[in-house]
Image (cartoon, rainbow, N blue to C red):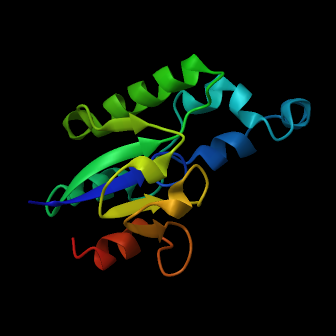
């Protein structure tokens, strides 16, 4: 049986920060820290370098799933995330997207996430903090997971 690995969407597969940074200053100022109110940032952000191929390569040795948190007050964001996964990950995404604000409730071996919020810090398996040493890139993560 293959080990289960969950991969966070925003900040690990999707470059959501680039979308946020590209917003006009007046919009950022108007919404403040509640940036999730802007549904459009989830519509079609660019993937992080190596993320698409990296996620597909996980299938060689693991049973991978996409795990993401979506803003509760933005049903459009949920839809945009699902469509993004389907569009960019194709057959690899079929029924593999899980949206949850409680990542610690999922059972698995690894969680690749860029932060410890929404239960990621309490995940029962091993948390791989993407974007931080020693997991700065997808190449680093795949090497660690022997893929």
Among all residues in the image, which is located at the extreme bottom?
134
Tell me which corner region of the image, top left, top right, bottom left or bottom right, holds residue 16: top right
Which residue is more in the foreground, 80 or 119?
Answer: 119
Q: Position of residue 95 (x, y in %)?
A: 25, 31
Q: Position of residue 139 (x, y in %)?
A: 36, 71
**61 vs 14: above or below:** below
Q: Residue at x 27, y 37 (%)?
A: 93
Q: Is residue 23 left or right of residue 74?
A: right
Q: Residue at x 30, y 64 (%)?
A: 109
Q: Is residue 25 left or right of residue 46?
A: right
Q: Quadrant of the C terminus?
A: bottom left
Q: Quadrant of the N terminus?
A: bottom left
**33 vs 82: above or below:** below
Among all residues in the image, which is located at the extreme left?
1
Q: Position of residue 110 (x, y in %)?
A: 34, 64
Q: Is residue 13 visible?
A: no
Which residue is more in the foreground, 23 or 80?
Answer: 80
Q: Is residue 99 visible?
A: yes
């Amino acid at each position: 049986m293959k080990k289960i690995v969950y991969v966070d969407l925003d900040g690990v597969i999707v470059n959501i920060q680039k979308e946020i940074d590209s917003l006009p200053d007046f919009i950022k100022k108007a919404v403040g820290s509640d940036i999730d109110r802007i549904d459009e940032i989830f519509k079609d952000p660019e993937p992080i370098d190596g993320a698409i191929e990296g996620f597909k390569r996980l299938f060689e040795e693991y049973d991978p799933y996409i795990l993401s948190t979506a803003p509760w007050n933005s049903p459009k964001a949920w839809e945009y995330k699902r469509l993004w996964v389907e569009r960019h990950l194709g057959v690899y995404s079929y029924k593999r997207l899980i949206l949850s604000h409680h990542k610690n409730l999922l059972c698995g071996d690894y969680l690749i996430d860029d932060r410890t919020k929404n239960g990621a810090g309490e995940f029962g398996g091993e948390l791989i903090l993407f974007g931080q040493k020693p997991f700065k890139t997808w190449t680093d993560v795949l090497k660690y997971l022997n893929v």
